[in-house]
């Protein structure tokens, strides 16, 4: 086929992303009609912190794949465009998450959901990404994990005395 497997895969991802974004927007609109001051956690919102942004990102990723990669300049422009869209969507999701924390911060279910989920869904589905996140974080020792001799707190010699104490 002239279009190729990337074209068809991209089109399929575009359609799925468009449907996800539309369903997420409709579900949130319906929920907010009846629960204006509540945090939306129904339908696709049970699985993702921002399923509408996920749908939009998938739509644009599908567009990126379906362009075909036939020549350098269009491929380069498409890659730059996709990177820009990802930055915008990520910034929008962070901004909205900050506003949601202000508005729903007193709700323990909201905190638990955001601790265990992200835009892509439940974090345990993405265990391999968590490993990459851990690798990219700087290692800063916490005070409670340092030997007592370095912190000056608590027993350091196993006898209940600090090294700085004298008998």
Image (spheres, rainbow, N blue to C red):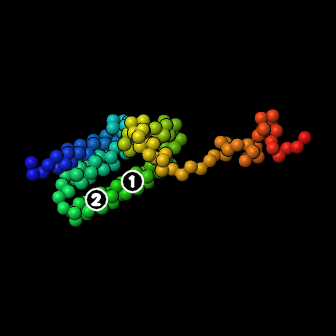
Q: Which residue is mark 1?
A: 90
Give how far apart the Cα atoms at labels 2 and 1 are: 16 Å
Q: Nearer the viewer, residue 155 or 11?
A: 155
Query: Could you tell me residue 48's position as x and y percent?
Result: 38, 40
Contact flag, marks 2 and 1 (Cβ < 8 Å):
no
**Residue at the top extreme?**
159
Q: Quadrant of the C terminus?
A: top right
136 in relation to 109, above or below: below
Tell whether 43 sits left or right of 100: left
- The residue positioned 28% from the left and 59% from the top of the image is 79
Dot label at residue 79:
2
Whether residue 46 is visible to the viewer of this picture, yes or no, is yes
Tell whether 139 sits left or right of 26: right
Query: Could you tell me residue 99's position as x and y percent?
Result: 46, 51
In this rendering, which labeled residue sits more in front, label 2 or label 1?
2
Tell whether 97 sits left or right of 7: right
Q: Nearer the viewer, residue 135 or 105?
A: 135
- The residue positioned 76% from the left and 40% from the top of the image is 156
Instruction: Indicate the secondary structure of the residue bearing disc 1.
Output: helix
Decide which of tag 2 and tag 1 comes sooner along the chain. 2
Query: Could you tell me residue 166's position as x and y percent?
Result: 88, 43
**Residue at the bottom extreme?**
73
Q: Nearer the viewer, residue 60 or 76?
A: 76
Query: Could you tell me residue 137's position as x and y percent?
Result: 51, 50
């Amino acid at each position: 086929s002239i279009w190729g497997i990337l074209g068809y895969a991209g089109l399929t991802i575009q359609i799925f992303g468009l449907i996800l974004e539309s369903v997420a927007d409709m579900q949130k609109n319906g929920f907010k009609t009846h629960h204006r001051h509540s945090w939306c956690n129904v339908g696709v919102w049970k699985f993702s912190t921002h399923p509408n942004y996920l749908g939009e990102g998938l739509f644009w990723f599908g567009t990126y794949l379906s362009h075909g990669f036939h020549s350098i300049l269009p491929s380069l422009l498409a890659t730059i465009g996709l990177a820009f869209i990802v930055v915008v969507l990520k910034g929008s999701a962070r901004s909205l998450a900050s506003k949601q924390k202000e508005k729903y911060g007193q709700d323990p279910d909201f905190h638990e959901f955001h601790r265990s989920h992200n835009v892509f869904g439940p974090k345990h589905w993405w265990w391999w990404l968590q490993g990459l996140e851990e690798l990219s974080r700087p290692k800063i020792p916490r005070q409670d994990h340092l030997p007592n001799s370095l912190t000056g707190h608590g027993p350091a010699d196993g006898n209940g005395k600090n090294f700085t104490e004298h008998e």
